[in-house]
Amino acid sequence: MKIIPNIPGALFLARNVLWADRYAKKIDRARESGEIENEKALINEVLHGWSKRILDKWNWTINVTGAENLPKDGPVVFISNHQGFADVLPFMQCVPFACGFIAKAELKKIPHFAKWIPRVRGIYIDRDDVRSSLRTIAEGAEYLKQGFSMVIFPEGTRTKDENHSLGEFHHGSFKLATKARVPIVPVTINGTYKCFEKTGIIQKDLSFDVTFHEPIDLAGMSRQEMADLPEKVREIVKSAL
């Protein structure tokens, strides 16, 4: 990463988190009082606004295919490939309900921003700690039961290139959906690596593609079908790259 050219962008992102803070107390109060529907609406509103400010700032456009495959409400688990930091934006902008993200534990180190992952029903995961991963799955399954949808990037890291690379889909990433028995929506994202990862500098005036594939209903699936899910979903995601 080239530090000096990215300073203005970093400052904007910091200000954007401060902009989101106007929702913090409202979301916290709704959660504490058990007003789940109000909490969902507030989370959806802040994520939509936060992401739109980013898209407008750098003039990024999301080209959507398969919008008809989006359920009107959750809970579902979105399983997507991971090309760049901008991969979160389609879920915030295009999905009509609140989604939490399974985020790598390293993001806890970002001052102030770190509080927002759990505030919007996201969960940190330490893939090197088995007990931590199991707690994450249990917590995520509970969120799904409450009606919150989740987003998982099962490759575990960004591919960051233009060769349509697709890493292995880790089987553990699917336990969240199989434990809660909610539908899986495979998602293909293509082109977000151009926003930052390709050059190491935030770029302007770009577009990228997102494809929402048909949901996969887990109800009535056999053990073997469950075991085959990672490769099945990976092939679906790969088909739109």
Image: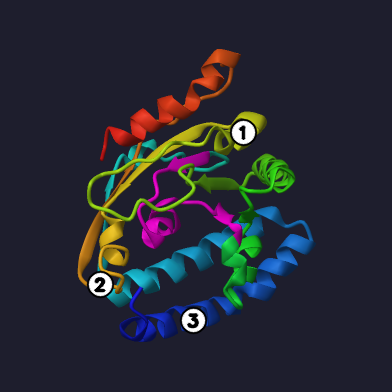
Residue 32 locus on image (x, y percent) = 78, 63
Which residue occupies 53% across, 60% down? 44
The region drawn magenta spans 77-105
For label 3, the SS is helix
Give the label on residue 147, or none.
none
Q: Earlier in the sequence, mark 3 or mark 2?
A: 3
Residue 36 locus on image (x, y percent) = 69, 54
| Three-letter amino acid code of the residue under disc 2 | Gln
Q: Is residue 186 visible?
A: yes
Question: Which residue is under mark 2?
Answer: 203
Question: Which residue is under mark 1?
Answer: 175
Residue 105 locus on image (x, y percent) = 61, 59
| Dot 3 alpha-carbon crowd within 10 angstroms: few under 14, some 14 to 19, many 20 or more | some
Give the label on residue 14, or none.
3
Task: Locate residue 144: give its quadrant.
Answer: top right
The stretch drawn in magenta includes residue 1: no
